[in-house]
Image (cartoon, helix red, strand yellow):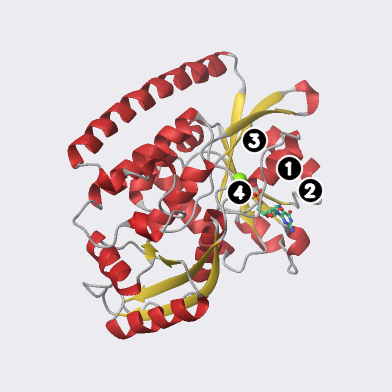
Amino acid sequence: MNKTERAVLVDVSLKKEKIDPYDLVELEALAKTAGAQSVGEIVQSRDKPDLRYYIGEGKVAELKAACGSTNAEIVIFNCDLSPSQIRNLQDELGLKVIDRTGLILDIFAQHAHTKEGKLQVELAQDNYSLTHLTGKGIELSRLGGGIGTRGPGETKLEMDRRRIRKKISQLKKELDEIREHRSIRRERRRLSKIHVAAIVGYTNAGKSTLLNTLTKAGVVAEDKLFATLDPVTRMLKMTGNKEILLTDTVGFIQNLPHDLIEAFQATLEEVTEADLLIHIVDISHPNFIEQINSTYKVLEDLSAITKPMLTVFNKVDKYTGDPKVLLKKYSPAVAISAVKGTGIEELIKRIGKLI
Ligand code: GDP
Ligand code: MG
């Protein structure tokens, strides 16, 4: 286990967009998954980002004071910063600064388990360092290890562009080979006429928990974002001795940096190949409608939105309202509790019917 880092979180809303308190809640959860504990939070609303620091000079002073009084070790921004903004902030604060993409990359680096998952993270980190490779500023190594410095990305800042480019094309080649193998596996699956259902949904909705409940698969289910990075596929026995393959996917989140779509490839392919999408929604989350819509957006990007879909409202044990109206609106839909086992029989029946 890595030691927990003390982090000050910064959320900026631009162009008079109203500040959404759940943005910070989500950032906190992402930080926790990466191994950082929030010890302070700073918000600012501005028309456009400041060229030098993203936030205004006065806010930088406030941030510096907050870091000092909380003994923070790292500052995490909920947006993408330019390389020079990162450098200026690090110089000014004397602390490590990372942005949203850097944070998500770090989570990927810690949670990739398969060869393909690891290669994908490495590819994403290389692409990221290629665009963030400039000049001096405080050397990251002087600011210690931890978030943003882990995994294959560690020494990237010292590499020159050419070497990174060469490495990228090598990684792509290796990934292509692995993908080739996977498509052969999939073809075999198709020939055996076994149907595939993919569990999709916003991160933390309960996808892994459901796969566990359904198949006793022993997939990691944790109260962390991105606990699942690599797709896990398990056999599910239906009534009448029918079997289907059920695959767990990485969680979707809002504002997923576009560069990272590449890193999701393995999971996304499972989605585009599936016969049925099982869309898990955490009905107990105050923002669940927005979460449904961000999942739809990713599915649209993948041209998978027209696939047959069963909406599963999970965590009804924590929901005080009546899901009836929602079940009608999002039909076909069921309400379940993956943890308590409520509604699972009905769910399996519905999956059987739709497949
Ligand atoms: P994933 O990111 O969608 O795979 O979500 P996980 O399966 O890892 O679950 C995230 C968190 O939600 C875990 O702490 C689970 O224990 C919790 N959770 C999952 N299903 C339920 C449920 O039906 N009720 C409640 N109360 N919590 C649940
Ligand atoms: Mg999961």
The span from disc 3 to disc 2 (Cα, nearest Å) is 17 Å
Q: Which of the two labelled residues, at mark 3 and mark 4, occupies the earlier sequence position?
A: 4
Left or right: where 123 falls relative to 115: left
Alpha carbon separation for disc pair 3 and 1: 11 Å
Q: Which part of the image, by quadrant, shows the C terminus? A: top right
Q: Amino acid at mark 4?
A: Met
In the rendering, at what x and y percent does residue 324 appear? 72, 61
Which residue lies under the disc numbered 1? 347
Residue for badge 3: 354
According to the image, label 4 marks what residue?
1
- Residue at 47% in and 56% down: 294
Sequence-wise, the earlier of marks 1 and 4 is 4
Task: Choose mark 2 or mark 4, whichever is in front.
Answer: 4
User: Is any part of residue 303 visible from this angle?
Assistant: no
**Is there a contact, CB below 8 Å, between mark 3 and mark 2?**
no
Q: Is residue 132 left or right of residue 43?
A: left
Check disc 2: other Cα within 10 Å, few if <14, some if 14-19, many if 20+.
some
Query: Residue at image x 79%, y 48%?
Result: 343
Alpha carbons under labels 3 and 4: distance apart? 43 Å
Please give left or right for residue 253 compared with residue 175 in the image.
right
> Mark 1 falls on what kind of element?
helix
